[in-house]
Image (cartoon, grey):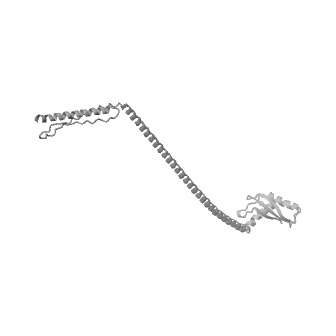
Amino acid sequence: MTRDSKNLVPVSMAVLLHVIIFGSMLMAFNYARPTPFTPLAIQATLVTEIPDKAPPPPVVEPEPEPEPVIEEPEPEPDNSEELRRQAEEEKRRLDALLEQQRLDDLKKKEAQDKARSEREEEERKKREEEEKERQRVEAERKRQEDIERQRLDNERLRRELEAEQRQTEIDDEARRMAAENSPEMVVYQTMIMQDIQRSWAMPASVTPDTVCVVMVRQTRTGDVISARIASCVPADEAVERSVLAAVTKASPLPEPNNPDLFRSELRITMRPPQ
């Protein structure tokens, strides 16, 4: 009994090993065949002597796991040059994008600066035009004010001159009126008549009753401008011609001592000396 119990373990191990080997062969055969097959079931009966006392269950040592096959990784291809080229290409692309962005920003800034400059120039021109218009309006206002002030001044001066002239004329007329009736006027007219009478060559037709009125125009210095007979009675043409010739011969007529006595037109009455 002792021998049999000692042989039970090796026998069991042998049987189990055969079963495993057979199963492996079946699996290998199944994988090798092109078409599936149904494996035959094998029934085996192990007859052993039953010991008086059940032996302890056999200790089945686990089969050692097969070492894993570590596949050597295939060496990676050397693509560093390609990566470098791609990196350079990417860098050039990014640089080109950055340069284009910089140029776009520069153009945008230039356009903004140009627009701002044009706007500022337009505003400056507008301010200049407004200032010119303001100055023009101011100058026109001042010109109108000057014109109005000059007109008022001229009007005032005109009124003053007219008033002064009227006053002068009034004063002159008053002096003439005063001189006209003054003894000096009688003396002045007598001096003129005496000069003309001294120059009068009386014709034979003159009578003691002859009276001729002569209108004489003279200058300020006494030069006779013209003379005409206003009336002459009793007389004939010879008497009138002699009177006119006497007036012309007496030129220049005597000047008055008082300027107020001067008359540019004289009315002289001629009579033959008594």
Q: Front-most of 171 and 82?
A: 82
The quarter holding residue 201 reads bottom right
| Residue 267, above or below 33 | below
* Residue at point 50%, 47% (across, down): 115
The quarter holding residue 165 reads bottom right
How many marks overall? Answer: 0
Q: Quadrant of the C terminus?
A: bottom right
Q: Quadrant of the N terminus?
A: top left
| Residue 93 seen in the current view | yes
**Is residue 22 rendered to the left or right of residue 128?**
left
Q: Position of residue 238 (x, y in %)?
A: 88, 60
Q: Front-most of 165 and 155?
A: 155
| Residue 93, above or below 176 | above
Q: Position of residue 163 (x, y in %)?
A: 66, 65
| Residue 68 seen in the current view | no
The quarter holding residue 32 reads top left
| Residue 121, above or below 210 | above
* Residue at point 78%, 58% (across, down): 224
* Residue at point 13%, 35% (across, down): 4
Q: Front-most of 264 and 98?
A: 98
Q: Position of residue 92 (x, y in %)?
A: 42, 36
* Residue farthest toward the left in the current orientation of the protein: 2
Q: Position of residue 18 (x, y in %)?
A: 22, 33
Q: Front-most of 205 and 127?
A: 127
